[in-house]
Amino acid sequence: MYNTINKILLLWLLLVLVYPIYAVQSKTVYKCKYYEMYGKECISCGLTRGFSACFKGNFSKAQSLNSLTTFLFFTVIGQIIFRFIIAFKKTNKALIYIDIAITLTVVFTTIILIT
């Protein structure tokens, strides 16, 4: 069960990383519904363009688009590497606990950075 969930998360993270490249190049970036309704940017506004800037190595532009961009970009890269490694290892309880600890740390750090 754990390996299946890990592989699903790995696929999702890869899609999160690939979408900004596709969206910016094809100019199919969807407008933020929150921005359309309230005229203010939401906490994720600029992330797609920011991830695209990170791929080009322009981290200062990425940071100006959304202050969470570089943190989330490197977090996604780290998670992809970690999940790829554990996808092909025999699962044990210690590995599951490490995974849970890393995931919770990332989630709480993101929450702290948002507020």
Image (spheres, rainbow, N blue to C red):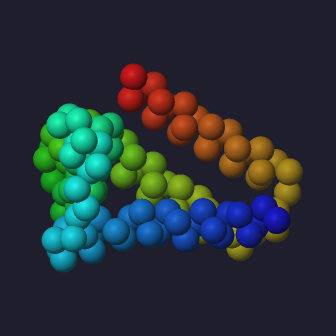
Identified at 77% across, 44% down, the residue is 97
Identified at 39% across, 22% down, the residue is 115
Q: Give percent across and percent down for residue 38.
A: 23, 36
Image quarter (top left, top right, bottom left or bottom right) of the N terminus? bottom right
Q: Give percent across and percent down for residue 3.
A: 75, 67
Q: Is residue 65 above or below residue 88?
A: above
Q: Does any portion of residue 23 appear in the rendered image?
A: yes
Left or right, residue 30 beside residue 113: left
Q: Is residue 58 above or below residue 23?
A: above
Identified at 47% across, 30% down, the residue is 111
Query: Farthest residue toward the right?
Result: 93
Name the quadrant containing residue 19.
bottom left
Name the quadrant containing residue 2.
bottom right
Name the quadrant containing residue 82.
bottom right
Left or right, residue 87 beside residue 18: right
Query: Farthest residue toward the front?
Result: 37
Question: Which one is in front, 32 or 71?
Answer: 32
Identified at 74% across, 69% down, the residue is 4
Count of labels shown? 0
Q: Give percent across and percent down for residue 83.
A: 61, 62
Q: Give percent across and percent down for residue 110.
A: 46, 34
Q: Does any portion of residue 57 appear in the rendered image?
A: no
